[in-house]
Amino acid sequence: MLSWRQRAVIFFQGFLRHPELVGSVIPSSRFLEKKLVETANVGKASVVVELGPGTGGTTKAFLKALPKEGRLLAIEINPDFVEVVSSNADSRLVVHQGSAEDIREVLTRHGLSAPNAVISGIPFSTMPPSLGRRIIQEVWDSLAPGGCFVAYQVRGKVADLGQEVLGQPLVAVEALNIPPVRIYTWRKPPAGNGGKG
């Protein structure tokens, strides 16, 4: 198991190689991890999807909170990060190298049901808007009724794109992170209720 410092070095190297694919220069703080666990209600989820786990700090926090019968699917595009996240020895974790826009196909491929939460750290501000909208729509279509989409971001582009597709998000701030981030949350209506979150 890698130390926080080792993960931070790998994370920073990934940022230098592909700044458009990595949302920050260092991994998330424990304060942000705790807020994400609470916001997404990971402790009561049966399936959680993490988009862009980086070097797996948030992944470890989600696994710690996830019920013993729960499953966590981590979708990461960077092969170096996939290797690090895959080193988590937890049978509840499925790590998939690929694009977030393929979330529904990846869930099906791994035999997982609709997620209760999708938590995303991928940087929507550096991707083409059309790709961002597609990812958001695919996430929304994949969610179980009553599920939530939680995106933590340095910039607010995901809120603009998400509002076009899903409506107004709930917004929180985690200042005890470098850099500080906003947490945007959309909740899918329970079964039988239509409309945006």
Image (cartoon, grey):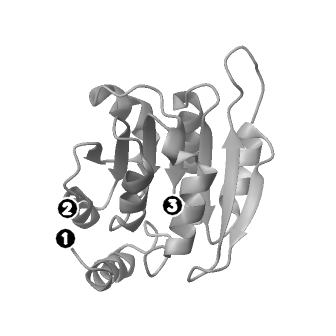
Circles 3 and 2, Cβ within 8 Å, touching? The answer is no
Q: CA distance from mark 1 to mark 2?
A: 12 Å
Q: Amino acid at mark 3?
A: Gly
**Nearer to us in this view, 174 or 76:** 174
Indicate left or right for 22 with 133 as reference. Answer: left
Q: Position of residue 170 (x, y in %)?
A: 77, 52
User: In the rendered image, which quarter is residue 180 located in?
Assistant: bottom right
Indicate left or right for 196 with 120 as reference. Answer: right
| Badge 1 or badge 2: first in the primary sequence | 1
Q: Nearer the viewer, mark 1 or mark 3?
A: 1
| Badge 3 or badge 2: first in the primary sequence | 2
Looking at the image, residue 147 lies above or below residue 59: above
* Residue at the extreme front: 68
Residue 1 tag number? 1
Q: Position of residue 76 (x, y in %)?
A: 34, 54
As helix, strand or loop, the secondary structure at mark 3 comes to loop
Q: Amino acid at mark 2?
A: Glu
Indicate left or right for 39 with 171 as reference. Answer: left
Residue in the image at 60% along x and 44% along y: 149
Residue in the image at 49% along x and 73% along y: 30
Looking at the image, residue 16 lies above or below residue 20: below
**Nearer to us in this view, 89 or 188:** 89
Q: Residues within 10 Å of mark 2 (few under 14, many from 20)?
A: some
Q: Nearer the viewer, mark 1 or mark 2?
A: 1
Q: CA distance from mark 3 to mark 2?
A: 18 Å
Give the residue at mark 3: 121
As helix, strand or loop, the secondary structure at mark 1 comes to loop
Q: Amino acid at mark 1?
A: Met
Q: Position of residue 191 (x, y in %)?
A: 67, 17
User: In the rendered image, which quarter is residue 31 located in?
Assistant: bottom right
Residue in the image at 28% along x and 46% along y: 93
Residue 83 tag number? 2
